[in-house]
Image (cartoon, helix red, strand yellow):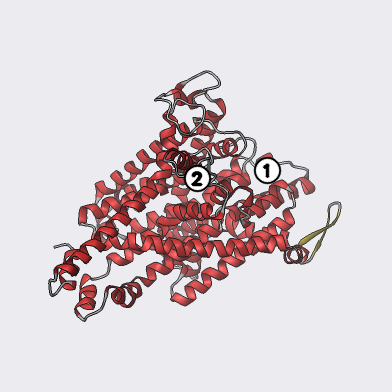
Amino acid sequence: MNHAQKRLAFLLLFAPFFLWILLLIVLPHIGVFILSVKEKVGMGVYEYGLGNYIEFFNEPVYWNTLLRTAVMSIFVTIVTLIIGFPIAYYIAKIARQRAKAGLFLLCLIPLWVSDLVRSFGWIVLLRETGIVSSFLQYIGIVSGPVEFLYNDATVVVGLVYTVMLFMIVPLVTTLDGMDDSLIEAGFNLGGSRLTVLRRIIIPYAMPGIISGCIVVFMLTAGSYLTPILLGGKNSQWFTEQIYEQFITRFNWESGAAFGVLLLIFTSITVWIGLRLSGQTLSSTVAKT
Amino acid sequence: MSSNAKTLSATASNPKPAAFNQVRFLRNCFTGYVVLFFIYLAAPLIAAGAFAFNDSMFPALPWQGFTLDWFFSDTEPKLGMFHDRRLLSGLSISFWVALTVAIMSIVVGTCNAFLFERMDFPFKSFCYIMMVIPLVIPGVILGISILVFASDIANGMEDNWGIDIESLRPGLLLVILGQFSFVTTITTLVIAARLKKFDIQLEEAALNLGASRARILRTVTLPFLKPALIGAGVVGFLISFENFNTTLMLVGSDAPLTITMYDRMAKVGSTPVLNAVSFFLMIGSGLLALLSVFVQRDKN
């Protein structure tokens, strides 16, 4: 190819990328930011200012919701890691070759099923007239129907379920690359199981742990459906607040400010995570 | 020998039976834990699917006997999903939206894959980060940002030139654009991963044999990419079909299936027809998943 042809080929390939990112990502987000610093002072009259943000910090309900979402998301991330790590270890190190592929595929199944169907499944299981409640009455542990929905524990169970696979996939990938002789050497040198886990396996798996945690945290903090359906009115999830400002109250300016805050908050958390682990965003996300 | 047996023999270097029993006990505990975990994974899916066949007005115990009414019955109150007009219209809207999103994101994703695998240009790593970013932005935020931007354009048009562009108001065009904005990242990653494995010498050989660039693309490179293109298409289709968060913010009067289902779930007391839809969706996505695994394995 001569120079002019090369240039043309580059432009033809660059154009769709550029239009996609510019029109659907960059400009819309700039639009949201501009909207968030607008204040309505009268009918159709707007002024620029930080009023929407000040309102957010003055109203405890708002920042409490963000704080709550943050704490719950971190909690969900930790629980997912603790539950998922042994499973990933089992798949990568203990299961035999054939079972390994099968178990891995089984872990992926929930990914192929819609979030909505999964949450609906939990509702059918856990509501007052649900399967768990009926079963408990049937075997006589409780005397009347029990409502398992609409509390924080259920929201955590549902969220952990939704994001589990994004923790397991990077963990399995990392642990798979680990040489078994490292573990053997640890035992031969007299290490107990706990020591081997703490000093050899976990440090080796660290890149996988970090990328899993980051993706899981982002997905949890940005989730909408699971907290709403399983937590009901008590869920107080921040994305719900954004929806309410936009669609129910038609207060787009403060909704936009909330959106910007959520984005800043998650970006900072992810940035700290990446800094602590010395990884880059592209390597982390591309892995899952 | 499996890795576990190795660890086992390493641990029990002096084979005392008590220590051996302890190892076996721990190992059984571990297996039990794994089994419990997979029950946890399966439970809600089974619960959602199984009650589609319960001959009762509510998706709950007790089991009243097997029925297919929730799929095929054409009379109220037990209206089956294949006779429920709103569910059917949701299904067909979702289908067309997902097909459009899949095709658009394959086309742009292929261009992106070639751009990032074959070209060198200034700010390439910055552009790569920009390409990945849509995947980490929460769906709700993607939704509101596109909603705000489209309304800004629509309002600007109306105020300045008096043109009212109906399609920039919440509706299917915005739903498609919203889903396309992040599905494209996924298709790009899938297609680029395959393109990376391509041996560039094949193209050079074809070039030396006198083939034109367009012909090489058509007869050598694209056939090589085909499994990834199909795989990316399937994934894009499913993600679009199942998307809720972004769609919710952009939807107009034509509601895709997830929105229709959500409305039923949240507002009306649900009948097992929702279980029937869930079952149908699980089977559908299961088949598509198998298809994509099959297509991708074929070439390896």
Q: Please tell me which residue lies in front, B108 or B256.
A: B256
* Chain of the residue under the numbered disc 1 shown in the image: B
Q: Residue at x 61, y 62 (%)?
A: A68
Distance Cα–Cα, label 1 vs label 2 = 30 Å
At label 1, counting other C-alpha atoms closer than 10 Å, the crowd grade (few under 14, some 14-19, many 20 or more) is: many
What residue did someone put label 2 on? A119
Position of residue A250 in the picture relative to residue A193 (left or right):
right
Q: Nearer the viewer, mark 1 or mark 2?
A: 2
Q: Is residue B28 visible?
A: yes
**Mark 1 belongs to which amino acid?**
Arg
**Most distant residue in the bottom direction:** A189
Foreground residue among A108 and B191: A108
Q: Position of residue A176 (x, y in %)?
A: 28, 64
Q: Amino acid at mark 2?
A: Ser
- Which chain is mark 2 on? A
Query: Which label sits on residue B169?
Result: 1
Percent across and percent down for residue B90 are 54, 33
What label sits on residue A161 in the rendered view? none
Of the 4 image quadrants, the one containing the C terminus of chain A is bottom left
Residue at x 49% of width, y 66% of height? B129
Report the quarter where the N terminus of chain A lies: bottom left
